[in-house]
Image (spheres, grey):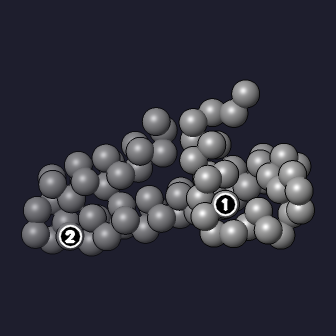
């Protein structure tokens, strides 16, 4: 049984028409790799957003740190 996160990733892949690349049973063999890819993309995006927060530290250091930590923590949910 797939997790909700995996199902969301598969749905996004279908919306992106990736299922057309893989034939009749498009994602059965690719779900692990697709999930890993999506996780890596999300990790990179979270880190980029956290770094934006950290660059704002010149205005409000405490808030910038809280913001960056909150964004990074989303990857641990």
The location of residue 36, given as percent across then percent down, is 70, 52
The location of residue 73, given as percent across then percent down, is 40, 43
Of the pair 67 and 55, the residue shown nearer to us: 67
At mark 2, the secondary structure is: helix
Q: Earlier in the sequence, mark 2 or mark 1?
A: 1
- Mark 2 vs mark 1, foreground winner is 1
Number of numbered callouts drawn = 2
Left or right, 6 with reference to 65: right
The location of residue 69, given as percent across then percent down, is 33, 48
Is residue 40 visible in the rendered image? The answer is no
Question: The N terminus lies in which quarter of the figure?
Answer: top right
Marks 2 and 1 sit apart, C-alpha to C-alpha, by 37 Å
- In which quadrant of the rendered view does residue 61 lie? bottom left
In the rendered structure, are the residues bearing label 2 and label 1 in contact, judged by CB atoms less than 8 Å apart? no
| Residue at 15% over, 71% down | 58
Of the pair 45 and 20, the residue shown nearer to us: 20
Of the pair 32 and 76, the residue shown nearer to us: 32
| Residue at 27% over, 64% down | 53
Residue at the extreme front of the image, as rendered? 24
Residue at the extreme top of the image, as rendered? 1
Is residue 43 visible in the rendered image? The answer is yes
Left or right, 9 with reference to 55: right
Left or right, 70 with reference to 72: left
Of the pair 61 and 30, the residue shown nearer to us: 30
Residues packed near mark 2 inside 10 Å, few (<14), some (14 to 19) or many (20 plus):
some
Q: Provide the residue designation for mark 2.
A: 56
Q: Provide the residue designation for mark 1.
A: 14
- Look at the picture and state if 1 lies above or below 65: above
At mark 1, the secondary structure is: helix
Residues packed near mark 1 inside 10 Å, few (<14), some (14 to 19) or many (20 plus):
some
| Residue at 15% over, 53% down | 62
- In which quadrant of the rendered view does residue 3 lie? top right
């Amino acid at each position: 049984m797939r997790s909700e996160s995996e199902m969301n990733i598969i749905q996004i892949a279908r919306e992106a028409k990736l299922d057309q690349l893989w034939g009749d049973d498009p994602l059965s063999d690719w779900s692990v790799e697709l999930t890993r890819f999506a996780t890596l993309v999300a990790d990179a995006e979270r880190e980029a957003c956290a770094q934006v927060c950290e660059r704002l530290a010149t205005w409000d250091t405490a808030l910038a740190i809280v913001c960056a930590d909150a964004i990074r923590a989303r990857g641990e949910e």
